[in-house]
Image (tube, rainbow, N blue to C red):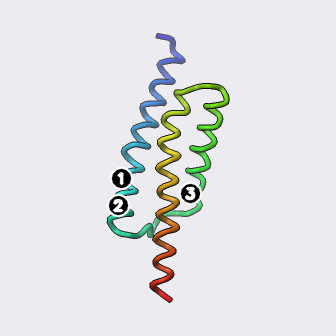
Amino acid sequence: METVTVFAWTATIITLLYTSLGLPSQIRKNAKSKSTEGLSLFMAVLLCATMTSWVVYGMLITNWFIVVPNSVGGVCSGVILIQIWKYNHSHNKSVS
Protein backbone atom coordinates (compact mmCIF):
# COMPACT_ATOMS: atom_id res chain seq x y z
CA MET A 1 0.00 0.00 0.00
CA GLU A 2 1.29 3.45 -0.87
CA THR A 3 2.44 5.70 1.98
CA VAL A 4 -0.04 8.41 0.93
CA THR A 5 -2.91 5.92 1.10
CA VAL A 6 -1.83 4.76 4.56
CA PHE A 7 -1.81 8.36 5.79
CA ALA A 8 -5.18 9.01 4.11
CA TRP A 9 -6.76 6.03 5.87
CA THR A 10 -5.12 6.97 9.19
CA ALA A 11 -6.39 10.55 8.98
CA THR A 12 -9.85 9.33 7.96
CA ILE A 13 -10.08 6.90 10.89
CA ILE A 14 -8.86 9.46 13.43
CA THR A 15 -11.27 12.10 12.14
CA LEU A 16 -14.16 9.62 12.15
CA LEU A 17 -13.34 8.61 15.73
CA TYR A 18 -13.25 12.23 16.87
CA THR A 19 -16.41 13.21 15.04
CA SER A 20 -18.40 10.05 15.74
CA LEU A 21 -17.40 9.65 19.40
CA GLY A 22 -16.34 13.04 20.75
CA LEU A 23 -18.90 15.34 19.19
CA PRO A 24 -21.94 13.07 19.77
CA SER A 25 -20.97 12.72 23.44
CA GLN A 26 -21.00 16.54 23.68
CA ILE A 27 -24.39 16.61 21.94
CA ARG A 28 -25.78 14.05 24.42
CA LYS A 29 -24.35 15.98 27.37
CA ASN A 30 -25.93 19.21 26.12
CA ALA A 31 -29.28 17.52 25.54
CA LYS A 32 -29.25 15.87 28.97
CA SER A 33 -28.44 19.10 30.82
CA LYS A 34 -30.49 21.31 28.45
CA SER A 35 -27.53 23.67 28.53
CA THR A 36 -24.46 24.56 26.51
CA GLU A 37 -22.84 26.49 29.34
CA GLY A 38 -19.08 26.43 29.01
CA LEU A 39 -19.11 25.99 25.23
CA SER A 40 -17.66 28.77 23.14
CA LEU A 41 -19.97 29.94 20.36
CA PHE A 42 -16.93 31.26 18.48
CA MET A 43 -15.21 27.86 18.58
CA ALA A 44 -18.41 26.03 17.58
CA VAL A 45 -18.85 28.34 14.58
CA LEU A 46 -15.19 27.86 13.59
CA LEU A 47 -15.51 24.09 13.91
CA CYS A 48 -18.61 24.03 11.71
CA ALA A 49 -16.99 26.35 9.14
CA THR A 50 -13.82 24.26 9.12
CA MET A 51 -15.64 20.97 8.63
CA THR A 52 -17.88 22.45 5.94
CA SER A 53 -14.97 23.97 4.03
CA TRP A 54 -13.12 20.63 4.10
CA VAL A 55 -16.22 18.90 2.72
CA VAL A 56 -16.49 21.40 -0.13
CA TYR A 57 -12.77 21.10 -0.86
CA GLY A 58 -12.94 17.30 -0.79
CA MET A 59 -15.87 17.33 -3.18
CA LEU A 60 -14.09 19.70 -5.56
CA ILE A 61 -11.08 17.40 -5.78
CA THR A 62 -13.21 14.23 -5.45
CA ASN A 63 -11.41 12.90 -2.38
CA TRP A 64 -13.73 10.79 -0.24
CA PHE A 65 -11.05 10.44 2.45
CA ILE A 66 -11.73 14.14 3.12
CA VAL A 67 -15.47 14.29 2.41
CA VAL A 68 -16.78 11.41 4.51
CA PRO A 69 -15.27 12.09 7.96
CA ASN A 70 -15.67 15.86 7.68
CA SER A 71 -19.33 15.46 6.67
CA VAL A 72 -19.95 13.63 9.94
CA GLY A 73 -18.14 16.42 11.80
CA GLY A 74 -20.05 19.11 9.91
CA VAL A 75 -23.39 17.58 10.84
CA CYS A 76 -22.40 17.14 14.49
CA SER A 77 -21.02 20.67 14.80
CA GLY A 78 -24.19 21.97 13.14
CA VAL A 79 -26.26 20.16 15.78
CA ILE A 80 -24.13 21.74 18.51
CA LEU A 81 -24.73 25.19 16.98
CA ILE A 82 -28.46 24.51 16.97
CA GLN A 83 -28.25 23.43 20.62
CA ILE A 84 -26.37 26.62 21.52
CA TRP A 85 -29.07 28.70 19.85
CA LYS A 86 -31.95 26.64 21.29
CA TYR A 87 -30.73 26.44 24.87
CA ASN A 88 -29.56 30.06 25.03
CA HIS A 89 -32.81 31.20 23.38
CA SER A 90 -35.00 29.20 25.80
CA HIS A 91 -32.86 30.35 28.75
CA ASN A 92 -33.31 34.00 27.74
CA LYS A 93 -37.10 33.51 27.48
CA SER A 94 -37.32 31.97 30.95
CA VAL A 95 -35.27 34.79 32.48
CA SER A 96 -37.49 37.57 31.13
Q: Mark 3 = which residue? A: 43
Is 89 positioned to the left or the right of 29 in the image?
right
Considering only vertical position in the picture, is 31 above or below 17?
below
Residue 23 location, x and y as percent? 42, 50
Q: Mark 1 = which residue? A: 25
Q: Amino acid at mark 3?
A: Met
| Badge 2 vs badge 1, beta-carbon distance below 8 Å | yes
Residue 65 location, x and y as percent? 52, 27
Give the number of the disc on residue 29: 2
Farthest-out residue, left: 32
Label 1, residues with CA under 10 Å away: few <14, some 14-19, many ≥20: few
Q: Amino acid at mark 1?
A: Ser
Question: Residue at coordinates 49% horizontally, 44% vertically from top-left?
Answer: 73
Question: Residue at coordinates 39% horizontally, 63% vertically from top-left?
Answer: 30
Query: Which label's residue is closer to the chain start, 3 or 2?
Result: 2
Q: CA distance from mark 2 to mark 1?
A: 6 Å
